[in-house]
Image (cartoon, helix red, strand yellow):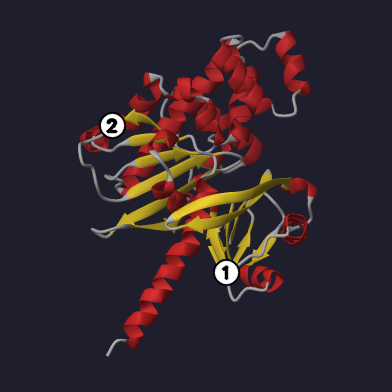
């Protein structure tokens, strides 16, 4: 039985998987709102006690950089130590991965129905891959291709500087700099980023905010989700303009990510936002921005671009990591014992 976790600033998901050959079957899953808890240990205690499932191995994907088996969650005051988690679960060791690294491990565990293709790319495309995911924050990870298989690795590209590409985006950048100082990509490409774009359009008088919308926004528990929904429904011009700017910047940054990792094997777009705004992501605006890289356009045209619509990709990846590590240890022992 494998315990897999996905720890983010908004929610913490835990699930128990059992193995059926090379396939994983989720036995139980539970979601906790991260902000309502002081740390991970209490959540783990509740899950293992209430579900009563014996844990034989575990791996957690966390929304933050992992160094020496420790991680400080980027948008949450939690510090997670793999050794402390292993001690609590009475295991020899526990895997601790950046959440996008875990997500990258999950890509090969998905099925065709879990993807929506935005660009087919070249036939039999192979090579490095990359993932980019916008949720509460912006995450990225690479998958190095050694000629036989992919090796996921983490990065913190979501915190790289935001690069404006036209006059309107330059005004957006100046607006955000007055509020926050240095502006990372995450300030724009995230749930809070959607609200930042909306506020800019309203405050800079680039679009009108109707009174009914002002009332709904102020009362909404999740303003970015409301803005996105109204944009897709065509009910507010300011919402439609907000989402158009978001998608244009998302396309450009996805292209940057693809070039940084030279992801000739494909780039995968994860996160709840892309999956919920698929009609807008299919708008030519996204791919036009993705391909707008001058002489590099021909390389980008050959890269498959897909949206991942399976929300369990990170959890599957965390569970797959434990299986891969187990197989690696078994192979290593066999090699050590060989004459």
Image x and y of residue 121, in percent: 25, 34
With 252 as the anchor, is 322 left or right in this view? right
Q: Residue at x 65, y 36 (%)?
A: 179
Label 1 sits on a secondary structure element that is loop
Residue lying furthest bottom: 339
Q: Quadrant of residue 242?
A: top right
Image x and y of residue 304, in percent: 30, 36
Q: Is residue 168 visible?
A: no
Image x and y of residue 44, in percent: 72, 59
Residue count near mark 2 (Cα–Cα under 10 Å), binned few <14, some 14–19, many ≥20:
some
Quarter of the image with the N terminus is: bottom right
Quarter of the image with the C terminus is: bottom left
Identify the residue under disc 1.
Answer: 69
Q: Residue at x 72, y 48 (%)?
A: 34
With 132 as the anchor, is 332 left or right in this view? left
With 85 as the anchor, is 123 left or right in this view? left
Residue count near mark 1 (Cα–Cα under 10 Å), binned few <14, some 14–19, many ≥20:
some
Q: Is residue 322 above or below residue 294?
A: below
With 153 as the anchor, is 209 left or right in this view? right
Q: Residue at x 61, y 40 (%)?
A: 136
In this rendering, the label closer to the viewer, 1 or 2: 2
- Alpha carbons under labels 1 and 2: distance apart: 38 Å
Identify the residue under disc 2.
Answer: 120
Task: Identify which residue, 170 or 261, lies in the foreground.
Answer: 261
Label 2 sits on a secondary structure element that is loop
Task: Identify which residue, 71 or 180, lies in the foreground.
Answer: 71
């Amino acid at each position: 039985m494998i315990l897999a976790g996905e720890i983010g600033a908004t929610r913490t998901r835990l699930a128990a998987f059992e193995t059926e050959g090379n396939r994983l079957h989720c036995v139980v899953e539970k979601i906790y709102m991260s902000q309502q808890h002081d740390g991970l240990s209490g959540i783990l205690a509740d899950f293992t006690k209430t579900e009563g499932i014996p844990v034989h191995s575990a791996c957690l994907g966390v929304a933050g950089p992992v160094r020496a088996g420790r991680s400080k969650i980027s948008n949450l005051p939690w510090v997670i130590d793999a050794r402390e988690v292993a001690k609590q679960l009475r295991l020899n060791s526990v895997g601790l991965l950046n959440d996008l690294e875990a997500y990258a491990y999950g890509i090969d565990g998905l099925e065709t129905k879990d993807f929506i293709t935005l660009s087919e790319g070249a036939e039999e495309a192979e090579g490095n891959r990359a993932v980019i995911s916008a949720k509460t924050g912006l995450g990225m990870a690479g998958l190095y291709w050694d000629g036989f298989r992919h090796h996921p690795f983490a990065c913190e590209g979501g915190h790289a500087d935001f690069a404006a590409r036209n006059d309107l985006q330059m005004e957006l950048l100046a607006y955000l700099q007055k509020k926050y100082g240095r502006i990372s990509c995450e300030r724009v490409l995230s749930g809070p980023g959607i609200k930042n774009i909306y506020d800019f359009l309203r405050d800079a008088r680039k679009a009108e905010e109707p009174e009914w919308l002002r009332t709904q926004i102020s009362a909404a528990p999740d303003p970015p989700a409301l803005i996105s929904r109204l944009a897709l429904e065509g009910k507010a011009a300011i919402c439609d303009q907000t989402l158009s700017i978001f998608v244009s910047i998302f396309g450009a940054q996805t292209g940057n990510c693809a070039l940084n990792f030279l992801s000739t094997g494909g780039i995968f777009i994860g996160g709840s936002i892309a999956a919920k705004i698929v009609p807008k992501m299919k708008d030519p605006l996204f791919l036009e921005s993705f391909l707008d890289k001058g002489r590099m356009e021909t390389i980008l045209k050959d890269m498959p671009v897909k949206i991942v619509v399976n929300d369990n990709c990170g959890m599957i990846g965390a569970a797959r990591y434990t299986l891969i590590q187990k197989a690696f240890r078994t192979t290593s022992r066999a090699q050590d014992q060989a004459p």
